[in-house]
Amino acid sequence: MQAIHYYFIRHGETEAEINNVIEGWQDSPLTPRGIEQMKALHESFSDLPIALVFSSPLERAIQSAELLIKGRDPELTVTTNDSLKEYGFGGLEGETFRETFDPSINDQILTLEAQKVPETQLLPELTRQIAAIDETGETERFIDFWSRIEEAMLQIHDDALEYRIDHQKSEINVMIVGHQFAISAFLHEVLSDFELTDRLNCGHYARVTYQDGHYTLDEWNEK
């Protein structure tokens, strides 16, 4: 069969994560545990042929991606894509989740679902509610967020198709190292039964296959 297997990988644990701090476009170094998570994932993928590796431009993602491919073919390099960065929380970045979001983001999603908000409007409404908390007005608008994620995935998909054709491969594996909110947003838009409340943990991955014009979720939150 002709297929592209995308491995959406969340970067390793960071100092901000263990302190429950909103990162967004800010950056925080990987913790020792975060480094070990990526080394363990490197071992899990040791027998998996990887065609291409893409990463968010944020340092926590780049560091994670480089740990994943360490020791592999030197021709396999990490390509950063600015549009893969996390959702921009604006003036909320650096604050703690617990103090900023009450109820939590997941609880807000569940409330919207209980209110029968259409699936296509869940993310726009959620980001509107997040923006309403940010007094600086710097929170990223949904249309800007989604447009760049869509642009990034279209570019990655074009590169993957070109690689598969040029190398005469029926199937290839592509790694995309990024962030929780951005990955979940994309999967929610392309998978009919994906729940926004499902969390991709640090150092874990989701395997999604693209075949015959459709995306299928094959593995979720694996390590």
Image (cartoon, rainbow, N blue to C red):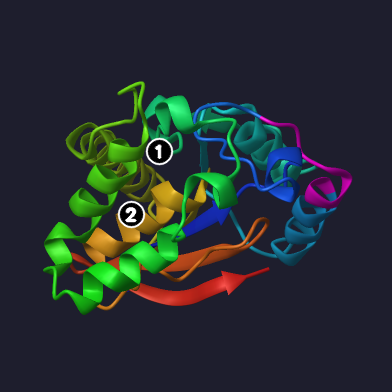
The type of residue carrying mark 1 is: Tyr
- Pinpoint residue 73: horizontal percent, then vertical percent: 70, 40
Q: Residues within 10 Å of mark 2 (few under 14, many from 20)?
A: some
Asked whether residue 177 is drawn in magenta, I would say no
**Residue at image point 29% right, 63% down:** 188
- Pinpoint residue 71: horizontal percent, then vertical percent: 80, 42
Q: Which residue is mark 2?
A: 185
Q: Nearer the viewer, residue 163 or 188?
A: 188
The type of residue carrying mark 2 is: Ala
Judge whether residue 176 can be spotted in this image. Answer: no
Asked whether residue 29 is drawn in magenta, I would say yes
Contact? badges 2 and 1 (CB < 8 Å): yes
Q: Which residue is mark 1?
A: 87
Magenta span of residues: 28-35
The answer to which of marks 2 and 1 sits earlier in the sequence is 1
- Pinpoint residue 116: horizontal percent, then vertical percent: 14, 75
